[in-house]
Amino acid sequence: MLSSYLESVRTGFAAFVGVGALVLLPVIALHYYRFGRVEPRRAVVLYGLLAYGLVALALIFLPFPTASRVCSGEDMLSTTPFQWVTDMRHNMAAYGRSGPGAVVTSTAFIQQAFNVALFVPLGVVLRKSYGRGAFAVIVIGLGVSLAVEVVQYSGNLGAYPCPYRIADVDDLISNTTGSLLGWMIAPVAMVIPAVPHRDASTAPPGTVTVPRRLLGGVVDFLLLVVVAHLIFQDNRWWVVVLTVAIRIVLPSVTGGRTPGGWLLRYQVRRVDGTRANPWRIALRELLGVTGLITYVVLAPAGWWFAVDVSVLALIVLGAFVAPVFRRDQRNWPDLAADTRAVETARHSTDPRHPAPTAR
């Protein structure tokens, strides 16, 4: 029995890895549409529920039998509550077993304990992450369990001519009990985060999101490639000079705007909304995009692979990954230089449109 459970767990987890990769970009897009960022606690709970759901489904429905092995004529519906207790007693009597040890090692008891444990995570998440009360958890647990039993009794919604697993009222009782037990122990489940309110998840007004800055960076990069190729024949030193001109010199002159920033209507300012001086812009860029381009262009051939990977990972993580999870969308270079990207339309001396401030 244990080996079959472990095999189902492995199958469910493998499905989670595949499905998780497929829904990663849609989840990021949905989060940006709703909140202007990826709220890490919401993402953790969402992926945790996805993993739990797929593993639970694998445990419930796998392995799938061949069609020829179903429809044996056995009654596949049990409507007698606590029938498992009677079955356990008959089994123990048939083998001359008695006592607590015999009870907890019996197949019927282990099966019901498994059914309880299977729904404990659901109760924990519903209370700890979403703040649901005991009644709501009971109703949801019962509803999910009932849906599973209906699918089983219908032969997986008609996929089989007959059900291959018994639809059992004891499963409803055990699953619902597991949900309630999860609700009871939820306060001590330290690894389960609470999902914050929408207001605490949403990026502040005027925040320039990472995708918007990435698109602006693509515009700058395309301009750099075209000019470097047409005028300077891809000379690597001129590539660096052009990068510095586009990403540092030009923003220092125009108040924090690169060509991509001008097109996407954002600029780099200090956190308090005042103009960022050239030194702050230079620090921000050398720790970010300009530093990365300079390293890629000027690093000698055959340089240590580990160093290349480390530099690339550090800059990409700090400049493009870390800000995805922050409310203000500031990356590590912004934090070092005390800067942030703000919408150009919002930066105004008009008191009706004050410059955004950090939160």
Image (spheres, grey):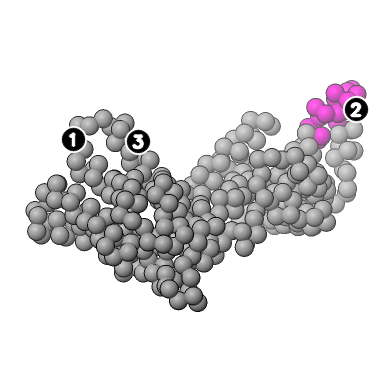
Label 1 CA crowd tier, 10 Å (few <14, some 14–19, many 20+) = few
Question: Is residue 185 something that shows in the picture?
Answer: yes
Residue 93's tag is 2
The residue pinned by badge 1 equals: 300
Q: Which residues are magenta?
A: 91-109
**Residue 199, x across and y down, in percent:** 62, 63
Quarter of the image for residue 260 reads bottom left
Q: Nearer the viewer, mark 2 or mark 1?
A: 1
* Amino acid bearing label 2: Ala
SS category of the residue bearing label 3: helix
Q: Earlier in the sequence, mark 2 or mark 3?
A: 2
25 sits to left or right of 160: left
Question: Is residue 145 something that shows in the picture?
Answer: no
Give 296 or 242, whichever is nearer the viewer.
242
47 sits to left or right of 150: left
Was residue 96 drawn as part of the magenta stretch in this picture?
yes
The residue pinned by badge 3 equals: 310
From what the image shows, is residue 358 above or below residue 73? below
